[in-house]
Image (cartoon, grey):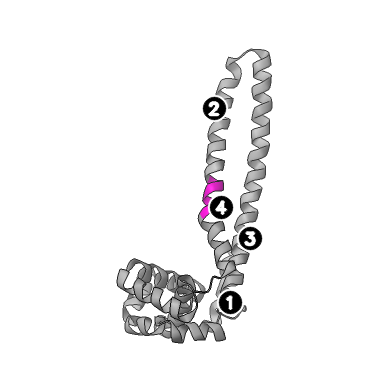
Amino acid sequence: MEINIWDLINRIIVIIGLPSLLVACVKIGEKLKTLNGLENEFKPDTKKFITKTNKEISNFGRSLSRLIERVRNMGEKVNEIWKNSFSTANSPRKLNSRGENILKTSGVKEIIDSKKDYFLNIVKKKNPKNSYDAERIIIDIVSDVMISDQKILEKIKEGAFGSGADIMAVLFVGGLYLRDKIFPDLGFSIDDIDRDEQTNNSNK
């Protein structure tokens, strides 16, 4: 099976990096509260030491927060680069030649075709507000459903191996394929995704 280095880096950042850093921030916050509570209970020299340590930990906490934000931004950029391996970089994303090959050889197309109505009903229950939201929901649902169903997951694993891709790539490709199939049923247009994405970002 082909190992995608960008996918690997992204997983390390998202699965290991961010949670670990967030836990560290929580622990630091707890220590700061403890130090603040103890500061007035000791002699002047000890109090001075605790105050100095408190400031140093505070500075470290701020630095760590900035690091977390940088890692998060890097994770988003790496994720975009990873997606570019299977689809066009511009919005709306469309499968490129590699993505099309994965769609044809992995078996995910046949799975989605057979479960189109099932997926459509789940997406409708999510009640997406616009085309951008609908695309994100569809891609997430494809991954959630296929990973949670052991029989489907086994087929995806075999298909990924046969297509020279990894499981996440197959699921992403399948998500874009399902989007194209059910967008008309949802009353959305693929051409509106970029506009709706900009609207969502401007409202944040």
The residue under label 1 is 85
Q: Which mark is residue 75?
A: none
Question: At numbered mark 3, what does the secondary structure look like: helix, strand or loop?
Answer: helix
Q: CA distance from mark 4 to mark 2?
A: 26 Å
**N-terminal label among 4 and 3:** 4
Name of the residue lying farthest toward the front = 1
**N-terminal label among 4 and 2:** 4
The residue under label 3 is 74
Indicate the position of residue 48 as horizontal and vertical percent values.
68, 20
Depth order, front residue of 124/47: 47
**What amino acid is at disc 3?**
Met
Q: Nearer the viewer, mark 3 or mark 2?
A: 3
Q: Nearer the viewer, mark 2 or mark 1?
A: 1
The residue under label 4 is 17
Q: Which residues are magenta?
A: 16-22
Look at 65% across and 18% down and name the residue there: 47
Query: Is 48 situated above or below 165?
Result: above
Look at 37% across and 85% down and name the residue there: 110
Look at 36% across and 74% down and name the residue there: 124
**What amino acid is at disc 1?**
Ser
The residue under label 2 is 34
The answer to whether residue 67 is visible is yes
**How many callouts does the rendering have?**
4
